[in-house]
């Protein structure tokens, strides 16, 4: 539940576009894929999420990505799963990031 205390709700934030711009800036487009999903929550909001898979990134690249996500007050991290790739001395990461949208 990282970042749950700073949830901000908006209707004009595009999590997919923001994340694509972020990984482009960080030169990670060839190592990252993401899948969009949304879910209506009991509190009346819609949670829009991206399930992100990072292949053979460095720990530093992951840390920079997490810092950038945490610095965007409209996004929060739901989960992070890290697997070490010994032969490559890198890591594979699966993370879920999300934003909330209010129903108009």
Image (cartoon, rainbow, N blue to C red):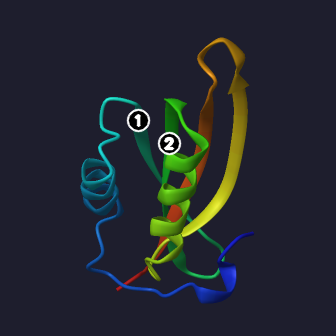
Residue that numbered label 1 is attached to: 32
Dot 2: what SS? strand
Asked if residue 47 can be seen in this view, the reply is: no
Residue that numbered label 2 is attached to: 52
Note whether 2 is above or below 23 in the view shown. below
Q: Earlier in the sequence, mark 2 or mark 1?
A: 1
Residue 84 spot, x, y in % from top left: 72, 27
Task: Determine whether, in the image, residue 66 is placed left or right of residue 11.
Answer: right
Residue 99 spot, x, y in % from top left: 48, 70
Residue 55 spot, x, y in % from top left: 50, 27
Query: Residue placed at 61% from the left, 70% from the top?
Result: 41
Q: Nearer the viewer, residue 85 or 94?
A: 85
Q: Nearer the viewer, residue 32 or 16?
A: 32
Dot 1: what SS? strand
Task: Determine whether, in the image, residue 17 is placed left or right of residue 38.
Answer: left
The reply to whether dot 2 and dot 1 touch (C-beta < 8 Å) is yes
């Amino acid at each position: 539940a990282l970042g749950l205390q700073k949830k901000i709700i908006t209707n004009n934030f595009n999590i997919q576009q923001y994340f694509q711009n972020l990984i482009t800036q960080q030169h990670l487009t060839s190592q990252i894929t993401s899948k969009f999903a949304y879910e209506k929550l009991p509190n009346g909001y819609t949670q829009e999420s991206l399930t992100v898979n990072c292949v053979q990134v460095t720990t530093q690249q992951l840390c920079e990505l997490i810092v950038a996500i945490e610095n965007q007050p409209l996004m929060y991290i739901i989960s992070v799963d890290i697997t070490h790739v010994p032969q490559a001395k890198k890591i594979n990461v699966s993370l879920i990031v999300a934003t909330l949208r209010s129903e108009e």
